[in-house]
Image: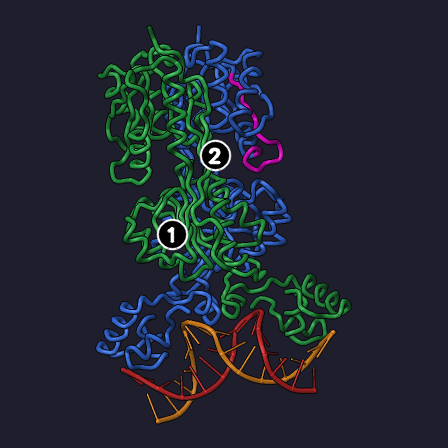
Chain colours: A green, B blue, C red, D orange
DNA sequence: CTGAAAGCGCTAACAT
DNA sequence: ATGTTAGCGCTTTCAG
């Protein structure tokens, strides 16, 4: 068995409670504390978090649930969360649900039980299911909004407005929008953002798809877009946009000379595409960080710093988006 | 507080020990088991893993340590691990060390203490440091080999041989190798693989760099390669290869007509590049899965199925690599 | 087959 | 300021 408080206690010649106090910052004489700390160090003592959690009711861990870690979007979120979590000395359980609702619900239940709180990123489950299985007190949604739950989202509507505004300014009057999954929250969000935009009487927005939110989906969309009159296309996300770029190149369509392409997300490879992709920048990692901080505020710090929990000031946070203009968008062809 | 065994026990009209047995598969009468199961289901009971772990000595969790989740290579590994872990009902702590050795060492210590075992992917620390802080009994290295520790690696030497063989067959006689970080294990592995290849008296391998193992590093390498006589280039990894492709395109060098490019890893975006990248396929997720299975075998199953632990049959596993030939490599220019 | 009781490693009253 | 004790939720002897 590993070294326990008892080992440290006898090594330092004190009782276990003194060890506990010395380590967690209770009242101990400086001399004693020093002795304990040294003994702990020498023995390589690491507290057993499970045991700590059992008594304090805080595990010092949190859960992060994402649909797919291989999707760079979610990898970015995970990166932000783990980085921030490390700085507050908080462990992170990650569950990749593989885009499966049942797995997601199961993960919420299990993680909800075994952590201090869970960050639920872009869940695929419906509002009702989520409300039923997740504890609104200890769950924060990321990139998804459900009434009655804490959440952090990006201002997609504004980003969409900027993208369309950019294309209009370049002279485009017929813009295709490649829709993603019909039933996804993010998809509806984009659609309603678009609907909310009176692009001007002279500008037409053509809906294309829906297609899978993947590179392949973009390849498919390429031909669809080319079959219509659009001179520019706004794609569901960067992956789709890159598939589009690929297909356009294969068919000899010059970008941006004959067709402008704009994506959403600004995943890291967006600037590596050919040409580099103009895209709506979504704060992915920052959303994860914000969600973590919201959660910590709600449950009072992972370090058990016992700040009065209370309800968070802002139960629904919206992060700004912007448009990263790169080379895939240009003036409309004459 | 959440529902506990006690709640289930009184709801089912039995004792807590009976509940425990019914749930963990001990001797219980079918009728009693059914009653307990129903009560548990009705109350939405989820065992507290911390408490379970405290007594059984198994947490049912494991740790995965990676240098950078945003790197698609590691995202793939993480995906493989989490998927397999879910199927054996095992939680996964993920720690992203941000390429930092100190953070890595700290993670090994903490996770080692609070999980049943840890999967250490491409650690940046040296052999000695690793040996000092990691428990060889419960740690499995992924994509790294250290004498005395369990590990799963890909057969990079063979992959390298295939890549060089491929280029030679296409007529290339002067091949540049873009080296990555000098001190990295993976870097040395590639270098020694190359050194072990007698490409033939008529073939020269030029070392270029080292550069950062990133897209930017590849961009930098592009000019370096162009300054020499090479007609083909083998890049440290796909990211570097893609940066190379980018720079080559910017400088108007046709790929593969004037220059062939080959990478390592086969990350998902390798086939999305322009042109699609020829690369040494490395089993990333499968390595994670294999490591997990090796660990489980070693510690006897996350479900506590108590198979005799014993030492694993194969403490060092090597997974095969292959060459995915795509459009970035072609016959050497005349 | 089932219940009572001990105790995993730790912290939080409660004593001293 | 420090030691003693109880007990977190659970599994596991040990009785019955």
Report if residue B181 lies within the magenta region. yes
Q: Which span of residues is magenta-colored?
A: B175-188
Q: Is residue A333 visible?
A: yes
Q: Is residue A204 left or right of residue B184?
A: left
Mark seen at residue B156: 2
Q: Nearer the viewer, residue A80 or B20?
A: A80
Q: Residue A146: x and y, percent? A: 34, 48
- Judge by depth and name the residue closer to the eye, B300 or B118: B118
Which quarter of the picture shows residue A308?
bottom right
Labelled disc at residue A149? 1
Q: Residue at x 37, y 50 (%)?
A: B84
Q: Nearer the viewer, residue B312 or B56?
A: B56
**Residue density around tag 1, few if under 14, some if 14–19, many if 20 or more, within 10 Å:** many
> CB of mark 2 within 8 Å of CB of mark 1?
no
Residue B75's place in the image compared with B128, above or below, is above
Residue B120 shows in the view: no
């Amino acid at each position: 068995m590993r070294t326990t408080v008892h080992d440290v206690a006898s090594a330092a010649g004190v009782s276990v409670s003194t060890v506990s106090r010395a380590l967690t910052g209770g009242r101990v004489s400086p001399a004693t504390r020093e002795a304990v700390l040294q003994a702990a160090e020498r023995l390589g003592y690491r507290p057993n978090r499970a045991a700590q959690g059992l008594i304090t009711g805080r595990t010092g861990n949190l859960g992060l649930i994402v649909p797919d870690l291989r999707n760079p979007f979610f990898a970015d979120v995970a990166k932000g969360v783990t980085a921030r979590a490390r700085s507050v000395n908080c462990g992170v359980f990650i569950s990749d649900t593989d885009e499966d609702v049942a797995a997601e619900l199961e993960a919420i239940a299990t993680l909800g039980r075994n952590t201090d709180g869970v960050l639920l990123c872009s869940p695929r489950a419906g509002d009702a299911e989520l409300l039923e299985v997740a504890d609104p007190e200890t769950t924060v949604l990321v990139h998804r909004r459900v009434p009655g739950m804490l959440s952090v989202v990006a201002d997609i509507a504004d980003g969409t407005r900027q993208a369309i505004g950019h294309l209009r300014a370049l002279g485009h009057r017929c813009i295709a929008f490649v829709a993603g999954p019909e039933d996804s929250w993010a998809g509806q969000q984009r659609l309603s953002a678009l609907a909310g935009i009176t692009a001007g009487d002279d500008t037409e927005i053509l809906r294309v798809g829906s297609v899978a939110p993947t590179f392949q989906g973009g390849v498919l969309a390429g031909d669809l877009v080319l079959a219509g009159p659009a001179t520019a296309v706004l794609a569901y996300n960067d992956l789709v946009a890159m598939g589009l770029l690929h297909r356009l190149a294969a068919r000899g369509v010059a970008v941006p000379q004959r067709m402008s392409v704009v994506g959403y997300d600004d995943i890291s490879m967006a600037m590596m595409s050919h040409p580099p992709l103009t895209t709506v920048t979504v704060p992915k990692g920052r959303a994860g960080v914000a969600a973590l901080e919201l959660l910590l505020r709600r449950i009072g710090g992972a370090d058990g710093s016992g700040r009065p929990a209370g309800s968070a000031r802002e139960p629904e946070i919206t992060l700004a988006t912007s448009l990263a203009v790169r080379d895939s968008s240009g003036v409309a062809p004459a």
